[in-house]
Amino acid sequence: MKLKLHVNGKKKSVEVPPMKRLLDTLREELALTGTKEGCGEGECGACTVLVDGTAVNACLVPTCQVDGCDVQTVEGIARGGGKQAARLHRLQRAFLEHGAAQCGICTPGMLMAALALPKHAALDEIRAGLAGNLCRCTGYMKIYDAVAQFLDGERP
Amino acid sequence: MIAAEGVEVLRPRQLKDALMMLRVAADEKRPLVPMAGGTDLFVTLNAGQKPAARYLDLWRLDKLRGVEARGKRGLAFGGLATFTDCIESKVVHKRLPILVEAARQVGGVQIQNRGTLAGNIENGSPAADGVPVLMAADANVVLRSLDDERRVPLASYYTGYRKTVRRPDELIVRIEIDVPDGAQWFEKVGTRAAQAISKVVMAAVGHRVAFGSVAPVIVRAHKLEAYVADGGRDVAEAKRLVGQDVSPIDDVRSTAEYRRRVVENLVAAWLPSLGSGPAGLDKAPASR
């Protein structure tokens, strides 16, 4: 099926089978490989993207259900890019400052899930908001530190 | 990658069109599988299960969204009401706080945003976390077809493992609850609060008790309920009776023996919350 969507603020049109996963459409049709596949069963959150501002697992969403929607992926959060030097998003800079990434596979999903959290979130809210994102390297403290700094929320 | 090629998806915008599509499919005996947020469906597809030939995408049926208060103690959940809708609803917090508690433990936020109560019910998993709460609260499932609507008590909705009374031409359009009086209680026992599929789930509203993951379907504990409704509070007797209400098995997540023990322990932990009188009469709805 042919469908139109906004991806990172740009109009896109793709022709894909309706049940193709949003994850595969992003990676294979739109060359946005920042969104990772981890478990493929909604456990790890590595494929988290925002659909109309709501965090979802792109591995569990059929592309037909994002027809006409606004999809945000990790590629869209920094400013600039291409020939121009990219200016990282404040959340990305917080991750760098706090050393909140190690192997990096979970990072795009962590960033997108964190972007769906409210400002000044309590630590419990941050924990609950990231409960669907697994990191197998660093543990979570540095990630919570970075997210709390970004949200101006409660520090661990 | 999943085998998405060749799968047909019908995408109605209106409920009556969806019901017509289901009717035609039923008449022509060409299965049409309703699909809501996809959080259960895509897990099975990603694991390699062959997709159905045809799906009915319900996601655009906006009339089925949301949660409403009904009367003084009632709740009506649309067929597309998500776990996030439950968590964010003030009236659910007030009238059925254990549903909020259960919804928060369904997967992570990403799953809560897409998973629906109706999908949780219809998919028929014995480990569904939301269903025991709805069942303990005497929920009714409203099934609509092109020419009629019927209300089925959730407690009699399942006919066997992942089998329900829904006919192929019907759709869950609403879940209705008149929240009964009585203390509310919920406990999920799993390896981790978020993201883990449960080993045992128990929900109670007054003397009404439902368990998940301890039988082929979510069950009400009828023998236990009759005992406590009569004022029975003896822990040993309650444990003995609940043992007859459940039939757990060994599987990848736990063993039958462990589940039995946990069920008994949960009942022992729950009993004191009932007070001494006949259950359900002396307490206002409240979370623990």
Image (cartoon, coloured by chain):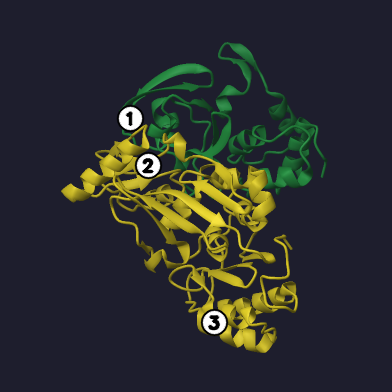
Marks 2 and 3: which is nearer the front? 3
The green chain is: A
Where is mark 3, residue-wise? B223
In the image, taking residue A67 as reference, residue B228 lies left or right, namely: right
- The reply to whether residue B23 is visible in this rendering is yes
Looking at this view, name the residue that lies furthest to the left.
B28
Q: CA distance from mark 1 to mark 2?
A: 13 Å
**Residue drawn at 53 percent across, 45 percent down:** B82
The yellow chain is: B
Query: Measured from the top left, where is residue B272 in percent x and y?
Result: 74, 76
B177 shown above or below B18:
below
Amino acid type assigned to the residue bearing label 1 in the image: Val
Where is mark 1, residue-wise? A16
A151 shown above or below B21:
above
Of the residues under marks 2 and 3, which one precedes in the sequence? 2
Amino acid type assigned to the residue bearing label 2 in the image: Met
Q: Secondary structure at mark 1?
A: loop
Looking at the rendered structure, whether the residues under marks 1 and 3 are on a common chain is answered as no
Quarter of the N terminus of chain A within the rendering: top left
**Residue drawn at 63 percent across, 38 percent down:** A110
Q: Secondary structure at mark 2?
A: loop
Marks 1 and 2: which is nearer the front? 1
Judging depth in this view, the residue of A51 and B34 nearest the camera is: B34
Looking at the rendered structure, whether the residues under marks 2 and 3 are on a common chain is answered as yes
Marks 1 and 3: which is nearer the front? 3
Q: Secondary structure at mark 3?
A: helix
**Callout 3 crowding tier (Cα within 10 Å): few <14, some 14–19, many ≥20:** some
Query: Measured from the top left, where is residue A11 in percent x and y?
Result: 45, 16
**Residue drawn at 45 percent across, 51 percent down:** B119
Looking at the rendered structure, whether the residues under marks 1 and 2 are on a common chain is answered as no
Where is mark 2, residue-wise? B1
